[in-house]
Amino acid sequence: MKGKIILFSLVFLLLTISAVSYAGDISLTKGISYDKWITLNLEKEGLVVREIIFKTDTEAKTGRFGLGVTRGPYATFVIVNNSGHDMEYGIALALFDKDHNLITASDFAQVGTLDAGERNEYDVVFGPVNMRYREASYFKIVLEAK
């Protein structure tokens, strides 16, 4: 039962990603590679997710909201605010296998704002449904900004 609830949550997240992208936010689908930076340049109103790396180790440098160390597969993304003002944002990631099955999903929301001109790196931890993380062949990312 617990597994079905988690799976339902992941499917709900995926549907949310789709709904958000239709609401005018920007999304991108790309092939995945591990332990190598992938260039994205996903931009919304001057906020740019430059690149992402999917790590095969399981210890992220920062936990959710930058609090402590978190264990589990993770990705690190680089974001830059090229707009002339501070911005709030969030991203969502979903990983799929070669047969287009959802493997895992996660999200990140900026606490506060990213200052104009600021560049940061953040970790997105995938869990608790992540046993097939290394089987992903592509991912979808959506950027929501205001």
Image (cartoon, rainbow, N blue to C red):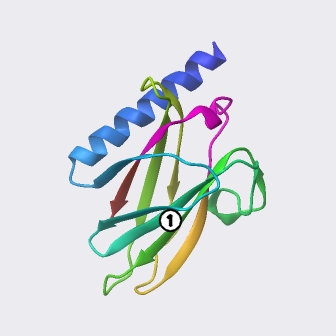
**Residue that mark 1 sits on:** 110
Quadrant occupied by the C terminus: bottom left
Please, is residue 46 above or below residue 36 in the view?
A: below
Would residue 132 be counted in the magenta stretch? Answer: yes
- Is residue 128 visible in the rendered structure shown here? yes
| Residue 21 percent location from the top left of the image | 27, 47
Residue drawn at (22%, 48%) of the image: 23
Stretch of the chain drawn in magenta: 124-140
Q: Is residue 142 left or right of residue 133?
A: left
The one of 85 and 127 positioned closer to us in this rendering: 127
The answer to whether residue 146 of the structure is visible from this angle is no
State whether residue 27 is above or below residue 113: above
Total marks shown come to 1
Image check: 131 left or right of 119? right
Please give the name of the residue rendered at 65% of the width and 55% of the height, measured from the top-left corner.
35
Question: Viewer-proximal residue, 132 or 116?
Answer: 132
* Image location of residue 61, percent across then percent down: 74, 63
